[in-house]
Amino acid sequence: MAHDDIYVRIGDAWGMYREGQHAAAIAEFERIVAQKPDEIDAHYGLGLALRAAGQQESAVTAFQKALKLVDAKLSPAAADKYSTIEVETETLQEALTEDTLVTGKHDRFTMLKRMTGQRLTELGVNVPVSRSGAVITDAIQASYDNA
């Protein structure tokens, strides 16, 4: 499957969701995540479509998967891959913990992390947040625990 093709399919699934075709959107998002399990946008869209269809528990699972994928993108190891500036790992972890945005990609992932945490909270899932209101996921929580 071509890289661009996956984004066309995600766009189509989002269109189905926006038009209220939740069953069709769910089916397409599920096909996408089956073929590309690390696609954050598909997991997030799946969560929204499932929630709209009244499938709360499945929506929680989809949002939790999206949150874990975002957390992995914001980890210091991933940050080295995406960062366009030289930053020591400790400094980068501190920056991510405080919600300082390092690059445009981090901006996107930080936004997705917040949005996914908000959706989980709306579904009654207790999602820890920092003093700044940012969602605290496993890697970030570990840095707080070790501080």
Image: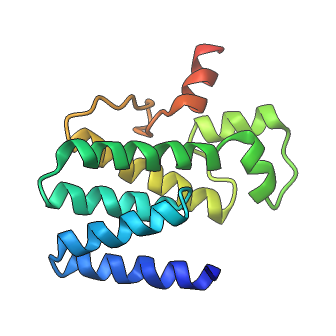
- Picture coordinates of residue 127 (x, y %)? 35, 32
Pinpoint residue 106: horizontal percent, then vertical percent: 62, 56
* Most foreground residue, 41 or 55: 55
Quadrant of the image occupied by residue 75:
top right
The residue drawn where x is 27% and y is 72% is 25
* Structure colour scheme: rainbow
Quarter holding the N terminus is bottom right
Q: Is residue 59 above or below residue 49?
A: above
Q: Which residue is situated farthest in the left direction here?
A: 54
Q: Position of residue 21 (x, y in %)?
A: 17, 77
Q: Is residue 10 left or right of residue 83?
A: left
Residue 29: percent from the left, percent from the top?
37, 67
Residue 76 shows up from this direction: yes
Query: Going 27% across and 49% down the picture, which residue do you hit?
Result: 59
Asked whether, in this view, residue 64 is left or right of residue 88, the answer is left
**Viewer-closest of 132 and 52:** 52
1 shown above or below 66: below
Quadrant housing residue 71: top right
The one of 37 and 81 positioned closer to us in this rendering: 37
User: Residue 25 vs residue 106: left or right?
Assistant: left
**In the image, 10: left or right of 20?**
right
Instruction: Tell me the quarter of the image containing the C terminus.
Output: top right
Q: Does the image show residue 41?
A: no
How many numbered discs?
Answer: 0
Q: Residue at 58% across / 37% down in the picture?
A: 98
